[in-house]
Image: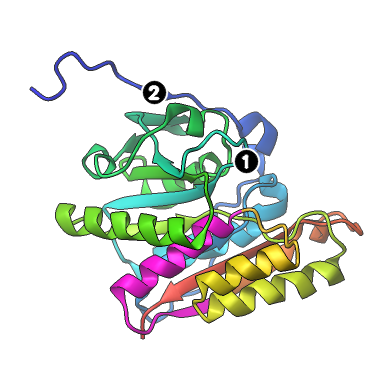
Amino acid sequence: DENKGRTFALREKMSFGLFSLSFIPLSLHFGKRENQSLLHLLIEFFHAGYIYSGYEAIHFFELVRLSEIGFDTIIILNPDHQGNSPEFAASPHDEWETPLGNLLIDKEMSIFFPKSEIAHRNEHSAEVMLPFIQVFFGSLAKILPISIGNPTPETAKKLAQVIFKATRETGRKILIIASSDFSHYVTPENGVMLDNLALDKIEKLDSNGLFETVKKFSISVCGYGPIMTLIEYSLLINNNPTVNVAIRGNSGKDSLSTSVVDYITLIFSTQ
């Protein structure tokens, strides 16, 4: 028995007192759309409270629900805000706890990745996705959070290859969420200008260009590592993926401010 002698590992909830679950919107309706071929997901929001970023988040999950596509495992690629991750590391836990119950880690897929408990211990950028996953996919959905500590194009290519191998050998149908905000604490006008520089490289599927642009213009998009990984993975599995902006906004829409955090939802799809 492979589980003999193992200790059950639960990753306890950490961030929800800070992000306020009471603001999760659960009932947006867009009307039935024709089934589009969703490749994977790129999410650019979520590090602020749900009152700020939840509206952008909900559009993606509603689109996936309407597509009626089923997924075996949801991989969450998140940046490391704490500086505790190695190059990249999956969660070593068996389950993650949320206020809505626990979610199972896909242990069969996780064996392909290095693991680090400390990389996920106090990191919120994967955790805040989980209630949306539970509401839209149910508590039986399996997850695989992967924290990226060395966000370079080389790391993105390497991680994309590991995900590709793990998916091929397990036969999993996966959904990938890349967790990121865009510009932080800028004027709305400056945020749009800076974000458009990054979006230009993302829409061209140019991970090297995105990395160089973020560094050159000091764009505070915190999840450019996950974004680059999603770009590289999409190029591995499709010759002509496209990127579409589903919605974009900022934290000033609910409380007018000259210093906002920007949120964008992008959908990677096939033709």
Location of residue 239 in the rendering, given as x and y in whole percent from the top left corner: 32, 83
Residue 8 in the image: above or below residue 113: above
Q: Nearer the viewer, mark 2 or mark 1?
A: 1
Residue 236 in the image: above or below residue 262: below
Label 2 sits on what residue type?
Leu
Label 1 sits on what residue type?
His
Q: Is residue 119 left or right of residue 52?
A: left
Residue 81 image label: 1
Q: Is residue 49 visible?
A: yes
- The mark tally for this picture is 2
- Magenta stretch: includes residue 213: no
The secondary structure that dominates the magenta segment is helix
Which residue appears at 35% of the width and 22% of the height? 9
Q: Is residue 180 left or right of residue 99?
A: right
Region rendered in magenta = 223-245
Q: Nearer the viewer, residue 203 or 33?
A: 203
Which residue appears at 76% of the width and 55% of the height? 184
Callout 2: helix, strand or loop?
Answer: strand
Location of residue 4 in the rendering, given as x and y in whole percent from the top left corner: 14, 16
In the picture, the quarter occupied by the N terminus is top left
Q: Nearer the viewer, residue 209 or 6?
A: 209
Picture quarter containing residue 265?
Answer: bottom right
Which residue appears at 62% of the width and 35% of the height? 82
